[in-house]
Amino acid sequence: MRRSVSTTALIAALGIAFMAIGTMRRSLIVRAQSKHESSVVKIDNFTFGPGTLTVPIGTTVTWTNRDDIPHTAVSTDGVFKSKVMDTDEQFSFTFPKAGTFPYFCSIHPKMTGKVVVH
Amino acid sequence: MAENKKDALIHDHNKDGVDRRGFLKCMAWAGTGALCVMQGGVMKSFSLSQMSQMGSKAASAGELSFVQISDSHMGFNKPANPDVAGTLKVAVDKVNALATPPEFMLHTGDISHLSKPEEFDTVDQILKGATPKDIFYVPGEHDMLNDDGKQFLERYGKGSKGAGWYSFDKKGVHFIGLVNVLNLKAGGLGTLGHEQLEWMEDDLKHLKHSTPIVVFAHIPLWSVYPEWGWGTEDSAQALAYLKKFGSVTVLNGHIHQIMQKVEGNVTFHTAASTAFPQPQPGKADSPGPMKVPAEQLRSVLGITDVNYVQGQQALAVVDSTLA
């Protein structure tokens, strides 16, 4: 009788443990998804959108060019410099440090944007 | 700044002998095949059929004739023009059909669309079919991608200084090719830079003030529309060096439409693209490729024929469309 109680308890404990892991996993996935969504800059109509992107340290930001003309993303302070992106091409950069990183399109310098890393 | 506002075409009222309404009327015709000619500061217009007449008249005066083409954007393939090689070929045919064979050509930049070697190769190949064998180039921002212009310099920069600036003389006319598309700063306009300006001052130093000068560069050297980057932030210094000359013509590209302004002894002129048109300042959200009905495309692309008549102050600049 004692053995069945302890087995049940073990199964129950394991069950709770698995559920907890499952929940953790799901929330990790959810967090990863939202991290992905908020780390994209869409380029269209000679504009970086969003103009200011705020992300946590370690985020990889991806610029995607949806315009019908090529653009670049070049950091004003020499932190990053993309190759030219034609329509539907991308550039990614991971930000290891906190700070404000203004950038612009070197082909159309009136286009400016900012990444704020905290 | 007040000075910039004065420089913008729409604020230029009658100080230069060009009536704004007359100019705008001419601009409207340019899209359907009429030609606007500046002769001695006076704007004249001709229909395309009269152009051969003009050409032979100019030839009898026995002077210099050259063509400006611009913004071929080889490699562009979006709806605004899926065949930029085809329209460049039409431009070459147009050059070859001119009554007075031009002595040489100027290409005011954006030769390629993405600075790819095959794009430059294709343009070189197409231009080999043009009658004038001498072609002088200045780069556009699309020609300096990924390598800060190394490829451009290798291909077209022999004998040039710095990022590719240079000068040469033809029949008593002094030509200056400038580069204003490198080291662009965030939020900024085109830029010439200190080194190039010093070179230019030195280059002009020993010339007689009666020498006609032609300056060519990609981005306009006057403030066409700063909001879209259509201007050069330090061009005032360059224009100051040119002030003492009796006849100065500035030829630019970049904005993919014909615009002209006369200020004192200086005639500014921008060429149409051979690839695709762009909207007029402020008439669209952004200065991107402008789609027009397919049958109208060639009427908004074009070449510029320039004639120097000795004794006349201004060069005769004649734009013609591909249709």
Image (cartoon, coloured by chain):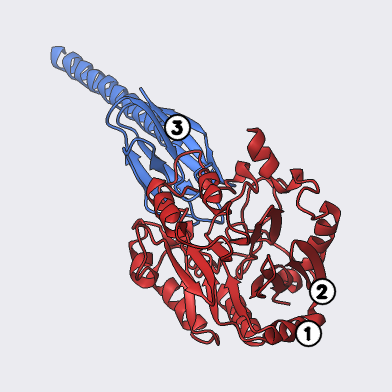
Chain colours: A blue, B red
Q: Nearer the viewer, residue B171 or B319?
A: B171
* Mark 3–mark 1 distance (CA, rounded to whole Å): 57 Å
Q: Residue furthest top?
A: A2
* Residue at 18% across, 19% down: A7
Give the numbered dot on residue B46: 2
Please rate how many residues cluster around mark 3, counting C-alpha atoms within 10 Å: few if below 14, some from 14 to 19, many from 20. Answer: some
Labels 2 and 1 touching (C-beta < 8 A):
yes
* Residue at 52% across, 63% down: B208
Q: Earlier in the sequence, mark 2 or mark 1?
A: 2
Quarter of the image containing the C terminus of chain B?
bottom right
Mark 3 element type: strand
Labels 3 and 2 touching (C-beta < 8 A):
no
Give the numbered dot on residue B53: 1
* Mark 3–mark 2 distance (CA, rounded to whole Å): 50 Å
Q: Amino acid at mark 2?
A: Phe
Could you tell me residue B32's position as x and y percent? 80, 70
Please indicate whether residue B220 sits to the left or right of residue B28 in the image: left
Q: Amino acid at mark 1?
A: Gln
Give the numbered dot on residue B251: none
* Residue at 45% across, 56% down: B205
On the question of residue A66 being in view, the answer is no
On the question of residue B34 being in view, the answer is yes
Q: Which residue is mark 3?
A: A114
Q: Is the residue at mark 3 from the same chain as the one at mark 1?
A: no
Q: Chain of mark 2?
A: B
Q: Nearer the viewer, residue B259 or A29?
A: B259
Please indicate whether residue B43 sits to the left or right of residue B266 in the image: right
Relative to A7, does residue A111 appear above or below in the rendering? below
Quarter of the image containing the N terminus of chain B?
top right
Please rate how many residues cluster around mark 2, counting C-alpha atoms within 10 Å: few if below 14, some from 14 to 19, many from 20. Answer: some
Q: Amino acid at mark 3?
A: Lys
